[in-house]
Image: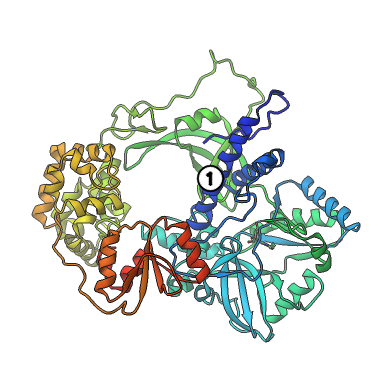
Amino acid sequence: MQLDLFNTEELQPQDNSQQEKQEILALRKELEDANYKYYVLSQPTLSDREFDTMMRRLQDLEAKYHDMADPDSPTQHVGSDLSQKNGFRQMQHMRPMLSLANTYSEQEICEWYERISKDLSYKPDIVCELKYDGLSISLLYENGELVHALTRGDGTRGDDVIDNVKTIPSIPWKVKDTGNFEIRGEILLPWESFDRLNKEREAQEEPLFANPRNAASGTLKLQDPRIVAKRGLDAYLYYLLADQLPAGTHYGCLQAARQMGFNVSDAIKVCHSIEEIMSFINFWDTERKNLPVATDGIVLKVNDLSLQRQLGFTAKTPRWAIAYKFPAEKQLTLLRKITYQVGRTGVVTPVANLEPVQLSGTVVQRATLHNEDFIRQLDIQEGDMVWVEKGGEIIPKITGKEQNPASPAQPDPDTAPSFRFITRCPECGSALLRDPEEAAWRCPNEDGCPPQLKGKIEHFVARKAMNIDGLGTETIDLFFSKHLIGNIADLYDLKPEQILSLEGFKQKATQNILDGIQASKQVPWSRVLFALGIRYVGETTAKKLSKRFTSIDDLRNATQQQLMEVEDVGTQIAESIHTYFSKEENLNIIERLRQAGVQLQSSDTPLTPSSDTLKGLTIVISGTFMHHSRDEYKDLIELHGGKNTGSVSKNTDFILAGDNMGPQKLEKANRLGIRIVSEDEFLNMINETDNI
Ligand code: IVH
């Protein structure tokens, strides 16, 4: 969705209230969606700046249209990291965990200071601290012992991730103070651990984390504390709460917390004037680049706790605090050349090759230009000076160009050279096609274009497909260039001497690859189907198709109608399957895979044998599932001695929750403190993991 974030009110005196009301609804939806992707999935789609700008626009519009007020609006509650099926116990926060008002403008910091000084009739001391870019945590101590560690959740309830938090060396399990108190702070993955983790993931061909925040939040929600311990999380604490606090000021409380053994940053200052505040901000804007952890701004808090109480809270934020956020770092550099990359699916992506420039600690010389429309919107071409930004994402972004002072602001469209996307594939020379529905240009030569052929092999060997060890991108490139492999079936004809003849391949590495290929012959039919790389047949669809069509021959002979009887299969997927089987080349490959002994049909393993693992347990099923139908889960519960009931009550032991669990069931389960068990966890419980 494109949103016009500019205020055009002055230019258009006519009534545009209907339009703005529509915009309120659109912004709410977009922001809720962004919150979910950020907090629950740890896969943000918007930069912080984009998110904040949209939130600000929504706040302004809501202030203008009171009749549109809605307590469920994202302006009225914090984003939620509660996930419906993560298996952690959820708990009510002792005191709500709120967010902070934020701004990118020094001017607005001054205004905030003026405003609170006016409200208090007094210029209060302000504590300035770094704003750590991780995820917030609330640690609860009873009689000096750490008893719960809650994520922010939806602000009122959080996930208790205590087992994971206990793996963080700087968090004490026990402190000398024997009282009950809560301390809040931020869990972070230091840069060094983040770089190491991403290197490991790259080697394992796992998707990289976009930034340390996402890595920290993904890590904290892992089910196995042993893996968490290896990741190297750290924590900084910044907010002490208790009925009886050790001091009357925020600063005093933090010093006391440090004395108790908590990791409280040294980068804290009590400022007595706006000038001192500004110099703290300016100092740390540069100095923060030398810190071991990511920070994204400065938090300003009224120091005196009684003045804090006087100022109080809004629904979502305290009035006594505000965050100043640093602007994303950006640099101006020369766009030397636009080159083009062909991906495994044939999509052609333009890439900006830049004059190398230093940005957030790394040298940037390439940035994606996404697609033709993106380049046209920015109106850039080779030779332009462009702005490069690095926000929360790893990949730098081009955000605009600097008008060349020598050239006119509005180039003459008749004479100015305009950007032209390439018309032929840079790899194989085929004429490119663009689906009018899509932004991308695509090379249609699926069976002859080298990156697409290599991509198919990479997909085939991937962990979630045939899981063949030792065959990374580089090895596949090498084998391909030496003509050892040209398609997936060739893998099964590889001879040890062919591999050993290549530089760098000794006995052990060679054997490893051949063993991996041999082992892949046991991979079940559902994963083989996914591994074939039929367009639009992802992991889930492959699972569903393989249940209905228990062999490749059945699938090949299925009519479009029969294919579409499978859940989630529509015309597009059905047509893609037909196209796949209509190609001679693919039929040859399938025949060779069959000869090699790859599983092209289901092995008739019976449903898991019975046990009494669930004896005496009452289980409610809710949501939709990936591996079995609801009826199959009912049978499985009974086979393992459990009892399935329809509604949640205090007698329910746990809820087996799939996707889209009903909100009422979830609410009731939360209220009664009933455990939510995910599908995979459940299958693990009954030891039926072959299906995962
Ligand atoms: S104080 C009632 N201090 O920023 C407000 N928060 O954008 C208590 N954060 O949810 C928060 N560094 O996760 C505070 N020095 C700091 C912080 C900090 C990072 C986070 C925190 C909060 C978020 C708001």
Please state the total of marks drawn on the protein image. 1
Q: Is residue 220 visible?
A: no
Residue linked to disc 1: 396
For the question of whether residue 251 can be seen, the reply is yes
Going by the image, does 21 lie left or right of 628?
right
User: Residue 605, located in which quarter of the rendered image?
Assistant: bottom left
Q: Quadrant of residue 223?
A: bottom left
Tag 1 secondary structure: loop
Quadrant in the picture for residue 119: bottom right
Q: Is residue 647 left or right of residue 317?
A: left
Vertical position of residue 231 compared to residue 364: above or below:
below
The answer to whether residue 308 is above or below residue 601 is below
The front one of 356 and 322 is: 322
List x then y, in percent, for residue 246.
77, 78
Mark 1 nearby-residue class (10 Å; few <14, some 14–19, many ≥20) = some
Taking the spot 24% from the left edge, 73% from the top edge, the residue there is 639
Q: Quadrant of the C terminus?
A: bottom left
Q: Which of 580 and 508 lies nearest the eye of the viewer?
A: 580
Q: Position of residue 23 (x, y in %)?
A: 59, 36
Residue at the spot x=72%, y=69% of the render? Answer: 266
Q: Measured along the vertical axis of the image, is residue 254 above or below residue 475?
A: below
Residue 181 position within the rendered picture, expressed as x and y whole percent measured from the top left = 68, 78
Hey, which residue is sitting farthest top in the picture? 414
Color scheme of the displayed model: rainbow
- Figure quarter occupied by ligand 1: bottom right
Q: Residue at x 77, y 57 (%)?
A: 280
Could you tell me the amino acid type at mark 1?
Pro
